[in-house]
Image (cartoon, rainbow, N blue to C red):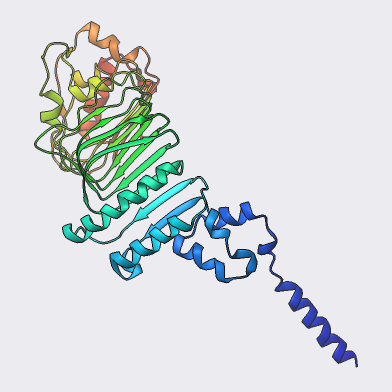
Amino acid sequence: MSKRLNDKGIMETAAADSEDRISALPDELLQYMMSFLLSRDAVRTCLLARRWRTLWKSVPALRIHGPYSYDGVTGCVTFVDELLRLRDPTPLDVCDISSDHDYESDWEDEAFRHVEQWLEYALESQVKVLRIRFPCLVVNINLISSHLKKFQLYRMELEGTLDFSSCQVLEVLEMTGCEISVEILSQSLRHLHVYDGCFHSDGRTRFYTPNLVGLKLAPSWGLIPFLGNMTSLVTASITLGKGCFYRRLLHEFEGAAGSNNCPVILNSLSGATNLELTIADPDVPIFKKDLKCALFLETLTLRFDFDTQKKRRVIETASCNSREQSLLSKHLKLVKIVCDTKNDKRVHHIVRILLTHGVLSEQIDIQ
């Protein structure tokens, strides 16, 4: 008798442990959890129970991956078109459309023609974050949205113009692994990040983003772009070398009218208070006249991302008059030099240049 009661207790405990507690959560919380799933998987939850039949229709995210996983372009297009047709008019927090396959012009271009229609739907659905990973050529992107805040592009070939003049609240643009040959236009943009990928090597990419406060440029190839007027800039991080045509770019406009004898890129960054320069190639020079363009710097970081033991020339010296000596030191509080050894001669050259410009030895931190 006691054994039978004991078995019954165990069964009751097991039943209690297997209770569907997730379904007891509010719809909004379940839909938030489902928003991290691929849209195809979110739709499949309709088979779980009666409660789940229509939850997927109001998930605040659109995540499309493939289309090989949908038996090709046709299967993917059919699914997504039906998804958008049946979905409730719920605003989107995120739209993420991606493909992991290499660029095959005919196939990818055919697929992207449908992607453009899905992007229009996302913008009409007040999407806040738009993310596209699609290896294809795109010429001229002109978005219109009063809700889009963040736009991320991956592995795309971009030509013509990226015009965000009609995206009044767009604050963040990120491009990773892209081939960039465009003009970028935005009054609202606050943060612009470029990782890997390349800029055009025959002509200058141009950024017209006057209200940027944060800039990160780390391309693997090409001419660093013309940055225009960035009077609001606070923090900038620039990686030079390993295929970046630095010397030609820095000095191609030197001595021209209105240039103040400053390298063109540092002239654009002259208002920044925090600047990090990563030197990824031992042949890239650092000039004294580069430093005098940084008029408002509070923190300067020089990072050597190569073996400083190699016998290469990184520093070029020049005379410095008393007026130049005061330009860098007025606001500067800290200079960080990050390298693999403190005993490299070029590090000592940099320190001497900084001291010549009025930087105090206690303001220099060699790591």
Residue 178 in view: yes
Q: Residue furthest bottom?
A: 1
The one nearer the camera, 212 or 280, is 212
Which picture quadrant has residue 152? Answer: top left
Give the left or right position of residue 208, taking residue 262 as reference.
right
The answer to which of 190 and 247 lies nearer the viewer is 190
| Of the pair 299 and 80, the residue shown nearer to us | 80
Q: Tell me where residue 33 appears, x and y as whole percent.
A: 56, 56
Q: In this view, which residue lies farthest toward the right?
A: 1
Position of 115 with respect to 50 (left or right) is left
Query: Is residue 105 positioned above or below 153 on the image?
Result: below
The extreme top residue here reads 323
Image-quadrant location for residue 160: top left
Q: Residue at x 27, y 53 (%)?
A: 112
Q: Tell me, yes or no, if residue 342 can be seen here.
A: no
Looking at the rendering, in which quadrant would you find the C terminus? Answer: top left
The residue at 33%/14% (across/down) is: 329
